[in-house]
Amino acid sequence: MSNSIINIVRSIKDSELAKLRITGSDGEMIHLDCIYKESEAPFFFLVFAPQAMPRDLEVSQKCSVAITRSSGTEEPVTLSAAIESFKGDRSLEMRALDTIDPVSLREYFRVMVSTPIVASFEPSSESSRQRPWQFNGMTVDLSGTGVLAVFPNEFENKNNIFLDITLPDSDKRVDCIAHVVRTKKLRKSRYQIALHFDTITRKNRDCIITACLQEQRRQLRLRMESM
């Protein structure tokens, strides 16, 4: 273990906001908000809201932890880490392995935000038995690689879904082609649908990432003001 990673962990203040990025048992990447708590470097703890911590995680499982500096003058730090142990049902003991260049994770950065989204499908030919459709929905969270949203209907098709997304706090819209990752039926005949972007221009992806980072800073500012 290098002294540099130990010194970086020591430099992180107690109770900073953090986000855990880890692969779930179903193979899907999950993102969880949590609180960073100090320990003896390179070890530290992550504390989650009640019932928020997945129970299917494994000891020694690798992940990344992004920690926001509340001072506003220091750059956020992203750690490559491993789970050391479970501490009750709300806390994980972690071991920092190395730092990660945040630029390499920009596309996967995900933020909880509600904004309009339109999903539609057009058959590839007039002779196709598939029917065209379009549904309006609202996003639950958004990243440069995909979106989770709620729609009034389940999609009739899983692939080649055209998405039109209105960026948060903006009139700007971006579009892309996506496929359905999973669908969950909610109450009141609504469906929560996760989609992964298959075809998207670099410009549109960068617009989404920028909007996500701006929304994270806005949410952080509101949290700090309410403390």
Image: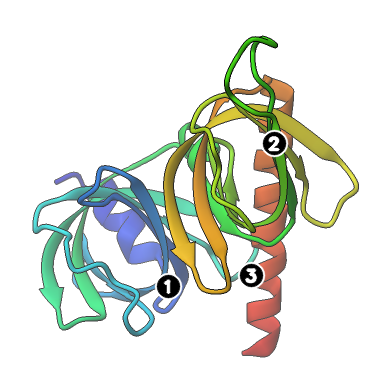
Q: Please state the horizontal and vertical placement of residue 153, each as a whole percent of the image.
A: 60, 53
Instruction: Say left or right for 214 vs 71.
Output: right
* Residue that label 1 marks: 13
Hey, what amino acid is under mark 3? Leu
- Nearest to viewer (mark 2 / mark 3): 2
- In this view, which residue lies farthest toward the bottom? 227
The residues bearing labels 1 and 3 have C-alpha atoms spaced at a distance of 16 Å
Q: Please state the horizontal and vertical placement of residue 194, each as a whole percent of the image.
A: 49, 47
The residues bearing labels 2 and 3 have C-alpha atoms spaced at a distance of 38 Å
Verify CB contact (< 8 Å) between mark 1 and mark 3.
no
On screen, residue 98 above or below 40:
above
Identify the mark nearer the N-term, 2 or 3: 2
* Residue that label 2 marks: 133
Most foreground residue, 159 or 43: 159
Name the residue: 67% across, 88% down.
226
* Residue that label 3 marks: 220
Name the residue: 44% across, 51% down.
183
Hey, what amino acid is under mark 1? Lys
In terms of secondary structure, where does tag 1 sit?
loop
Instruction: Say left or right for 132 vs 157.
Output: right
User: Residue 163's quadrant in the figure?
Assistant: top right
Most foreground residue, 25 or 153: 153
Identify the mark nearer the N-term, 1 or 3: 1
On screen, residue 113 above or below 104:
below
On screen, residue 50 above or below 114:
below
- Nearest to viewer (mark 1 / mark 3): 3
Verify CB contact (< 8 Å) between mark 1 and mark 2.
no
